[in-house]
Amino acid sequence: MSSAYEQAFQKTEVGEFEIKALPATRLIASQTEAAYFDGNNRLFRPLFRYISSRDIAMTTPVEAEINPGVMYFYIDANVSSDMLDATKNVSVHELPERLVASLGVRGAYNERNFNKASAKLSAWLRKNPTHEAVGDARGVFWNGPFIPGFFKRFEVHVPVKLVKE
């Protein structure tokens, strides 16, 4: 039930494109050599064990790099830095504010849906030359595994920079 979780930032509405600034944040990450959709359960468990063992609340969304697969959990700003130490399976990251192009999507979390949304976002960026992509697309997943696929919400984010005129 997502209402029990803190949100790291506001969702992009389904079917909407936007440029938005993601706040500076701390994340924990688990990674694999395989692509994200080849078995992301291997990524979730180390992160969940990490926050559970430190009594850190779950925060939404979960962010992912696709190839190779990396899963990120956002850490609430109220969590003391003393609680966040890297382990064999989990790394800790501090990111500055980031500017992204975002597309809000409804549907199952799978490679086909991600690729389709990523292509739409890339096409939108090409038609809106005020911003230029400066990195690869990431998945941003808002719902847990027990929500049926057709109810799930996700976003595709591409890091961008403002193009100087």
Image: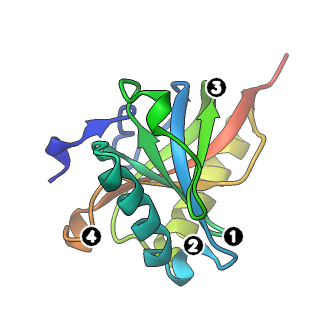
Mark 1 or mark 3, earlier in chain: 1
Amino acid under disc 3: Pro
Amino acid under disc 1: Pro
Eyeballing the image, is 162 above or below 95?
above
Mark 4 to mark 1 CA distance (whole Å): 21 Å
For the residues bearing labels 2 and 1, Cβ distance under 8 angstroms: yes
The residue at which mark 3 appears reads as: 96
Mark 4 or mark 3, earlier in chain: 3
Residue sitting at x 20%, y 49%: 2
Mark 1 to mark 3 CA distance (whole Å): 23 Å
Amino acid under disc 4: Pro
SS type, badge 1: loop
Mark 2 or mark 3, earlier in chain: 2
Q: How crowded is mark 2: few (under 14 residues within 10 Å), some or many (20 or more)?
A: many
Amino acid under disc 2: Tyr
Mark 2 to mark 1 CA distance (whole Å): 6 Å
Residue sitting at x 64%, y 54%: 137
For the residues bearing labels 4 and 1, Cβ distance under 8 angstroms: no
Q: Position of residue 88 (x, y in %)?
A: 61, 63
Q: Is residue 38 in view from this perspective? A: yes
Q: How crowded is mark 4: few (under 14 residues within 10 Å), some or many (20 or more)?
A: few
Q: Is residue 18 left or right of residue 11?
A: right
The residue at which mark 1 appears reads as: 68
Q: Position of residue 163 (x, y in %)?
A: 80, 24
The quarter of the image holding the N terminus is bottom left
Q: How crowded is mark 1: few (under 14 residues within 10 Å), some or many (20 or more)?
A: some
Q: Position of residue 164 (x, y in %)?
A: 84, 18
Residue sitting at x 64%, y 26%: 96
The residue at which mark 4 appears reads as: 145
The residue at which mark 2 appears reads as: 36
Q: Is residue 87 left or right of residue 74?
A: right
Eyeballing the image, is 81 above or below 39?
above
